Amino acid sequence: MTKKGLVIAGLAGGSGKSVVSVGITAALVRQGRAVVPFKKGPDYIDAGWLQLAAGGRCYNLDPFLMTQEAILRSFAIHSDDAELVIVEGNRGLFDGVDAKGGYSTAELAVTLDLPVVLVVNCTKTTRTVAAMVMGCQQFDKRINIKGVVLNQIATERQRRLITESVENYTGIPVLGSIPRLKRDIFPMRHLGMVPHQEYTDSHGALDFLADLVTENVDLDQVKAIMEPVPEPDIAIISKKPKSTVTPLPNVKIGILQDEAFQFYYSENLEALEEAGGQLIYVNAMLDSALPELDGLYIGGGFPETSARQLAANTSFRQSVKKGAEAGLPIYAECGGLIYLGSSIVLDSEDFPLVGIFPVRFGMSAKPQAHGYTIFQVEKENAYYGKGQEVKGHEFRYSKILDWQGSPDQLALKMVRGHGFIDGRDGLTYKNVLALYTHVHADGTPDWAGNFVQRCRSAKGLKE
């Protein structure tokens, strides 16, 4: 059976495309369809919900972090077993990093050659929705908008007026309408939606969304407007970079995964496995100590919301510090960087953390860094070669209250973005590298191999 897919986009962030994307995915899976979800852009939270809805991994396609070849390769490989493919966009359909819409959801839809379903927030409007949809339809004729889903519909009259207007003036079918909900199914926090790991009854939320979409969106019509996923270019797939690391013997790499640390690209975890890493999942709040490991990967997340539990688990914090002192390779991103600091101050209370780096963190009401980054490697470290330039992204509300370290500990110079302090990032100590920048394994294909190689070297295994 030929797999089919579509892109779900919005007019802006907050349009409701996550409700629609997760709801459609959950509803289709409930029907017994094999759905593989993708998320456009540097996002972990939406991707986590899509992954939960699909019952399988969600993958990120990011035109800034990844080359077009890497995007097509990832899309082809990861959708290989799919029956249906759902790609959730980010921000507005045409929003990119510049006035030409570079790296936008629209550009990704063109790259993937997939049709678009446009989700429109209809709060306090009727016929004007048709003008907005028509504007998107005419703005870039390469974009194939094949359906519209109305969101935040207050009355039956509003639904009817908007539906008639959109279909009359644009010829695009309205696939359904999501009513204004009394319940905020996806409460927002400073980084976006609450992650499913912290959500009370996340599976109940999926059932609610599946019911919501089934009752208010024509799923048969959604499937009908999906188009066959283009056959992949075999030459592109075959160009997937091969790790230079011999996959055997495996090394044991711990992954902190709990309510505090949740932000991992599926591609990063798979890349570590392909390079020879055996992944062992660890809970920083409940486990008494690190198990026997050859390396440790600490992703981002919300250590500030779990600071009391993290601080209270003294034996675990001590085991992480002991591992670092002994030369355990540790790679930490954003929330992981915070965890390796000396403490975090919340509401005037100081919560002790691992203490590898002499830095006290606090939280701000406004973003301290937000967007794509580029760094150059200036100093020796365990994972990147000097002179290497790497693309990534950062999104944080945390701030540095007190830094007692040396500038010599910072290995990376920010070409774009803020980093840790004074335009630099990448705190180093023995085999530890901790940075605010997140990287994507498909955009930095040597990252996983370098990590596993360092683990093997520290363990004393021969290449």
Image: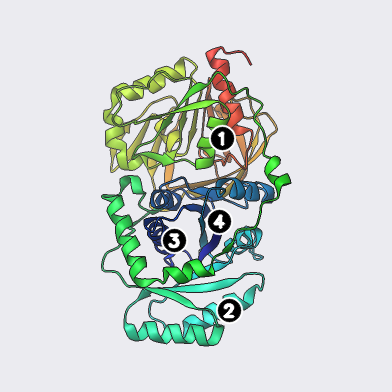
Residue 326 against residue 7 in the figure, above or below: above
Which mark is nearer the camera, 1 or 4? 4
Residue nearest the observer in this picture, 128 or 157: 157
Q: Residue furthest right?
A: 235
Check contact, mark 1 vs mark 2: CB within 8 A: no
Mark 4 burial class by Cα count in 10 Å: few <14, some 14-19, many 20+: few
Q: CA distance from mark 1 to mark 3?
A: 26 Å
Q: CA distance from mark 1 to mark 2?
A: 41 Å
Task: Please report whichever mark, 1 or 2, sits nearer to the chain's N-terminal start.
Answer: 2
Residue 355 to residue 185: above or below: above
Q: Considering the numbered disc 2 on the image, is that residue within a helix, a strand or a loop?
A: helix
Mark sitting on residue 21: 3
Residue that mark 2 sits on: 135
Please tell me whether mark 4 sits on a helix, a strand or a loop. loop
Image quadrant occupied by the N terminus? bottom right
Q: Please report the residue visible at 46 percent of the width from the left and 77 percent of the height from the top.
A: 174
Q: Position of residue 300 (x, y in %)?
A: 44, 40
Q: Residue at x 35, y 52 (%)?
A: 194
Q: Nearer the N terminus, badge 3 or badge 2? A: 3
Mark positioned earlier in the residue sequence (3 or 4):
4
Earlier along the polypeptide chain: callout 1 or callout 3?
Answer: 3
Please state which amino acid type lies under the numbered disc 1. Ala
Closest to the observer: 142 or 35?
A: 35
Question: Which residue is under mark 4?
Answer: 1
Residue 309's x, y, as percent? 27, 34
Crowding at mark 3 (Cα within 10 Å: few <14, some 14-19, many 20+): many
Where is 347 relative to 105, above or below?
A: above
